[in-house]
Image: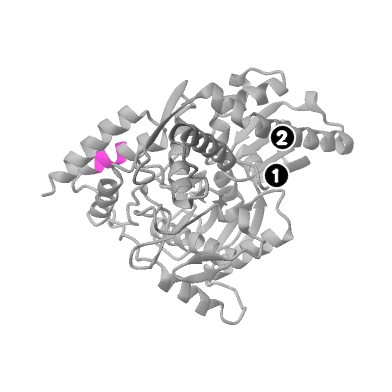
């Protein structure tokens, strides 16, 4: 995996987008390989105190409305409220795609009109229509909707010898699995199954339920119907879930949930694994269904699988890997995870995107589409300007402040990002280094003690700006 700090003229301007339930990732072909653009975009849409739409970061105030997991709502008639008005799911999704398009154009230094977008393999026609509508609202030509397992398989590349893979793709909100044959002729899907309502978000909800029960038992108060409290606990649950991938125990720190209730809720890895065990078992049932289809149609059963490939950020959870390895009679280290599971689908989408010629304009012909795009863009808060590269080329895109940034350090992280985005890459080297180290530690789910140390360094560097 190679990440480039700037784009070159060789970059293909048709982008690959992994439209995730919790995070969106993009890649472009640089003439040699797919390059994952820096700073994955959290799939969060909210509004600032001025009432403008903000994409990619949670609200500064818990009282502000926030929409997450919109991918699960696509294809439904659900109405979501922001800015005092109702939005349909494709419109909320369009806000994400508008921001992704903007970032891609900043990276490439030119207009982007075309995209290959991933979709859950179990998504039906209503969901696929909704994604196409959202892309139209963002002024993007959809060159292909690529099923997630196929995207993962494409990212593996082709060898001279055929290999059969089991793709196990457990993302934030959807689960897909497929048995695929990868070889010099390309990728063939032998069997597939999945669940559009199963993923890491459900694991977070298990922790939320556990924390609320603990609070009820200890403080004799039921906060389960308070959406603001649930949102706070959910954010903390996501952080602690990541921490349990490397630690045996953790604590959910929940100060001032109400005027009278603060809580510290211990959580062990063993307890967390017990919570998610039914969901993991369900995923293995879908895997069995994919294998049954491959065996019935192509004569490929469990023993015919050469390698098991992990995709989706939730596959980083040790219990998930252990159960999957045991299913195939392997050790956890025998699962193929040499490519970042959080980037795999975006890489595959970028590889497919290179096959399409870029258009000169957005080709949508539906009346009113441009007007709808302009309205949505007008409702969005202005993004922080990106700093021009030192060589005069495309802007240097700093990684965005991750959604899981500890509340104590979010203000200084946001302020540092804005300050750095307005200065050339070589300026303020101390602040830039401190900021990038802090963001990298968050994305790597570093322990709280390490985040506190790096957050203090960032605060000190920002304080030196005067």
Pick out the residue farthest to the front: 220
Find residue 116 and report its image quarter: bottom right
Mark 1 crowd level (few <14, some 14–19, many ≥20, 10 Å Cα):
some
| 128, above or below 431, in the image | below
Front residue (pair 129, 164): 129
What is the x, y in percent for residue 27?
50, 49
Residue at image x 88%, y 39%? 297
Secondary structure type for disc 2: helix
Report, in whole angstroms, how far the alpha carbon at label 2 lies from the one at label 1: 9 Å
Q: Is residue 355 visible?
A: no
439 left or right of 203 in image: left
Pick out the residue farthest to the left: 466
Secondary structure type for disc 1: strand
296 left or right of 216 in image: right
| 377, above or below 400, in the image | below
| 294, above or below 391, in the image | above
2 and 1 marks in contact (CB < 8 Å): yes
Residue interval drawn in magenta:
432-437
Residue at image x 40%, y 55%? 107
What is the x, y in percent for residue 255?
35, 39
Say which label, 2 or 1, has the lower sequence index. Answer: 1
Residue at image x 70%, y 48%? 121
Residue at image x 56%, y 42%? 201
| 259, above or below 319, in the image | below
- Magenta part, dominant SS: helix
Residue position for label 2: 282
459 left or right of 106 in image: left
Which mark identifies residue 399? none
Please say whether residue 185 is one of the residues in the magenta stretch.
no
Mark 2 crowd level (few <14, some 14–19, many ≥20, 10 Å Cα):
some
Residue position for label 1: 195
């Amino acid at each position: 995996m190679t990440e480039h700090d700037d784009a070159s003229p060789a970059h293909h301007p048709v982008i690959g987008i992994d439209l995730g339930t919790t995070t969106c990732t993009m890649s472009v072909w640089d003439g040699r390989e797919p390059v994952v653009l820096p700073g994955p975009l959290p799939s969060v849409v909210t509004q600032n105190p001025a009432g403008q739409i903000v994409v990619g970061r949670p609200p500064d105030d818990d009282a502000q409305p926030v929409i997450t997991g919109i991918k699960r709502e696509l294809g439904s008639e659900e109405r979501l409220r922001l800015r005092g008005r109702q939005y349909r799911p494709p419109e909320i999704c369009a806000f994400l795609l508008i921001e992704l398009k903007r970032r891609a154009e900043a990276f490439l230094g030119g207009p982007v009109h075309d995209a290959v977008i991933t979709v859950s393999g179990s998504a039906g026609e209503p969901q696929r229509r909704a994604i196409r509508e959202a892309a139209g609202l963002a002024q993007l030509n959809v060159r292909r909707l690529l099923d997630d397992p196929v995207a993962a398989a494409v990212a593996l590349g082709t060898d001279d010898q055929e290999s059969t893979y089991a793709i196990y793709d457990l993302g934030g909100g959807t689960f897909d699995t497929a048995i695929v044959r990868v070889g010099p002729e390309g990728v063939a899907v032998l069997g597939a199954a999945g669940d559009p309502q199963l993923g890491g978000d459900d694991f977070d909800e298990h922790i939320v339920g556990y924390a609320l029960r603990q609070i009820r038992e200890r403080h004799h108060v039921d906060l389960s119907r308070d959406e603001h409290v649930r949102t706070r606990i959910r954010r903390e649950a996501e952080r602690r879930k990541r921490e349990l991938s490397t630690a045996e125990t953790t604590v959910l720190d929940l100060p001032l949930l109400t005027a009278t209730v603060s809580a510290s809720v211990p959580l062990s890895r063993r307890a967390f694994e017990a919570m998610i065990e039914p969901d993991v078992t369900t995923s293995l049932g879908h895997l069995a269904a994919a294998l049954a289809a491959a065996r019935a149609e192509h004569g490929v059963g469990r023993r015919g699988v050469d390698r098991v490939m992990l995709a989706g950020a939730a596959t980083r959870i040790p219990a998930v890997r252990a159960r999957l390895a045991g299913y195939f009679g392997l050790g956890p280290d025998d699962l193929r995870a040499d490519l970042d599971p959080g980037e795999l689908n975006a890489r595959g989408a970028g590889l497919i995107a290179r096959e399409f010629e870029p258009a000169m304009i957005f080709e949508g012909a539906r009346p009113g589409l441009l007007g709808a795009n302009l309205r949505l863009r007008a409702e969005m808060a202005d993004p922080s300007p990106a700093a021009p590269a030192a060589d005069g080329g495309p802007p240097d895109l700093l990684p965005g402040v991750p959604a899981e940034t500890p509340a104590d350090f979010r203000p200084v992280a946001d302020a540092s990002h804005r300050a750095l985005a307005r200065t050339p890459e070589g300026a303020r080297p101390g602040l830039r280094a401190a900021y990038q180290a802090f963001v990298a530690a968050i994305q790597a789910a570093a322990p709280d003690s390490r985040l506190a140390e790096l957050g203090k360094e960032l605060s000190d560097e920002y304080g030196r700006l005067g």
